[in-house]
């Protein structure tokens, strides 16, 4: 189907259409089709890229109500929270790409050395090819579509797989993406582990995955079969350290919002709190008051408090209560509701019992739920020691994955920087070629001198070839001025 033939009729929230999961055996034909489409070079033009970004923006704006209703049904995330934390961020990236993409696509001049003079060295940002974007259910709209902006902007064909746990928002994308986007070059699929296995049987040019470290390892291992590069945005167990000078009111507000937004199902959330013992009790009390301020006496009735994604994760999160029930100063198992996947905001205060804190279930993994463990410290070095023994830092290294994106970094994430040297046939230095005389050797060693190469490289990057030729001619004229004068006066 050509881009002009795509049906762009908005899909109303009340639609009864439901698209079934993609069958694993369908992946081969999808892979073949996307590969063929990329080989036509259609995606390389600025016009195609901007056209698809426009289509993506139109899809979001014309169907905002559907997407926000889907996120509400998936996790009880309010429409306002969906706007602030997901929709607006994707739209902002689209606007940035539309504004700056043309300049990003231009060749980047880099330094050359003396031996390639008067050549010109450039880096070209080229599309990688056919790429896969695995979204994540916790922020399904954002974590699926924001990387797609980068993949399209960089000129790739894309296979999109949203987070399958978030059924309603995945359905929204399954229904709408084919109506708005170029289906020759951009496809969306849905399904579980069997579908993912089928995807990983093929040689993609890039795999972008957001999710758990365990699944990230599986994807990376299978990608290695084809030497496929990956960007892995994995989990984290990020500490929040509160020292004795902190403003407790502001700290509590930021902590509660960060730890409990989307019911704590956020990979960059503060996962546990280390607070100086002199203010520990006051901070915990302030956090309790702030939870009440944000979500009321019964957070289950609050429109601003989300739900755990499904019963499987409900069981995992509530299992983290085990062994710490006597330390819960807010929330806990009494009001939890498995039928609606409601887990109450829960504070577990270990106070100064560092051994019990370190051994607790809630400290053995990334929480991904509305639990806030707290422990008091006396000396800052205790915080450093505690953090260093963690396996799950967040920050793009180790178990939290590798690679980066957002804004221009998304463009670079899905691009290959190809080095290109353009050299005319004039001034082809004969000393570069054998056989070499002793004089040639002296010339070549002088030409590759490290300091000279540095100066020449900076000069070649700042000046055009014509200016450099003029500069060299003037330099030679100055150095040989006496010989030139004698020749002229003869």
Image (cartoon, rainbow, N blue to C red):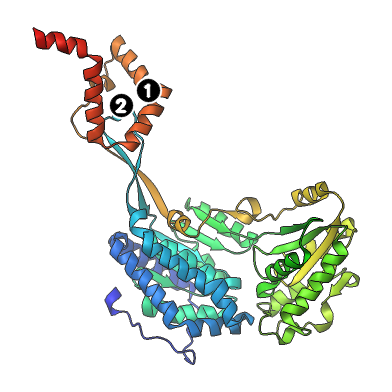
> What x and y, as percent, mark residue 17?
46, 89
Q: Is residue 205 above or below residue 179?
A: above
Q: Locate residue 394: give its quadrant.
A: bottom right
Task: Count neighbours of disc 2 (C-alpha within 10 A) and say few if under 14, some if 14 to 19, many if 20 or more.
Answer: some
> What x and y, as percent, mark residue 301?
72, 87
The answer to whether residue 180 of the structure is visible from this angle is yes
The residue to which callout 2 is attached is: 115
Q: In the picture, which quadrant includes the N terminus? A: bottom left
Question: Of helix, strand and loop, which one carries label 1?
Answer: loop
Q: Locate residue 430: give its quadrant.
A: top left
Report the disc number at residue 448: 1
Q: In the picture, which quadrant includes the C terminus? A: top left
- From mark 1 to mark 2, how far is it between C-alphas? 8 Å
Of the numbered discs 1 and 2, the one sitting upstream in the chain is 2
Towards the viewer: 375 or 148:
375
Q: Locate residue 359: give its quadrant.
A: bottom right
Classify residue 168 as left or right of residue 302.
Answer: left
């Amino acid at each position: 189907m050509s881009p002009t033939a795509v049906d762009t009729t908005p899909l109303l929230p009340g639609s009864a259409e439901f698209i079934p999961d993609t069958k694993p055996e369908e992946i081969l034909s999808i892979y073949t089709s996307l590969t063929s489409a990329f080989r036509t070079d259609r995606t390389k033009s600025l016009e195609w890229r901007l056209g698809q970004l426009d289509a993506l923006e139109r899809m979001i704006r014309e169907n905002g109500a559907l997407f926000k209703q889907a996120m509400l049904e998936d996790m009880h995330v309010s429409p306002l929270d969906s706007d602030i934390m997901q929709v607006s961020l994707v739209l902002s990236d689209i606007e940035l790409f539309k504004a700056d993409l043309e300049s990003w696509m231009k060749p980047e001049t880099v330094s050359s050395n003396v031996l390639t003079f008067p050549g010109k060295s450039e880096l070209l940002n080229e599309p990688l090819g056919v790429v896969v974007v695995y979204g994540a259910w916790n922020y399904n709209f954002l974590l699926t579509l924001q990387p797609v902006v980068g993949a399209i902007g960089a000129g790739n064909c894309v296979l999109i797989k949203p987070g399958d746990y978030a059924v309603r928002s995945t359905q929204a994308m399954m229904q709408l993406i084919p109506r708005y986007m170029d289906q020759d070059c951009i496809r969306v699929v849905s399904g579980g582990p069997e579908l993912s296995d089928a995807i990983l049987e093929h040689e993609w040019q890039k795999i972008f995955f957001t999710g758990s470290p365990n699944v990230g390892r599986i994807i990376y291992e299978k990608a290695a079969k084809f030497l496929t590069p990956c960007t892995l945005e994995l989990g984290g167990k990020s500490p929040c350290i509160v020292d004795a000078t902190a403003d407790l009111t502001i700290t509590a507000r930021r902590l509660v919002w960060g730890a409990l937004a989307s019911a704590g199902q956020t990979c960059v959330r503060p996962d546990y709190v280390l607070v100086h013992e002199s203010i520990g009790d006051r901070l915990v009390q302030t956090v309790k008051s702030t939870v009440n301020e944000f979500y009321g006496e019964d957070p289950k009735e609050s429109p601003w408090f989300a739900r755990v994604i499904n019963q499987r994760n409900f069981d995992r999160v509530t299992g983290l209560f085990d062994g710490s029930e006597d330390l819960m100063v807010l929330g806990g198992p009494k009001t939890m509701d498995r039928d609606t996947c409601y887990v109450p905001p829960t504070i577990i205060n270990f106070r100064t019992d560092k051994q019990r804190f370190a051994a607790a279930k809630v400290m053995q993994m990334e929480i991904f739920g509305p639990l806030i463990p707290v422990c008091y410290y006396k000396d800052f070095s205790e915080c450093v020691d505690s953090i260093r023994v963690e396996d799950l830092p967040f920050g793009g290294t180790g178990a939290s994955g590798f690679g980066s994106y957002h804004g221009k970094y998304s463009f670079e994430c899905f691009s290959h920087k190809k080095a290109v040297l353009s050299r005319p046939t004039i001034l082809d230095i004969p000393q570069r070629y054998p056989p070499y005389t002793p004089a040639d050797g002296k010339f070549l060693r002088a030409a590759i001198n490290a300091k000279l190469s540095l100066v020449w490289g900076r000069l070649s990057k700042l000046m055009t070839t014509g200016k450099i030729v003029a500069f060299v001619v003037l330099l030679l004229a100055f150095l040989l001025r006496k010989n030139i004068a004698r020749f002229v006066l003869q």
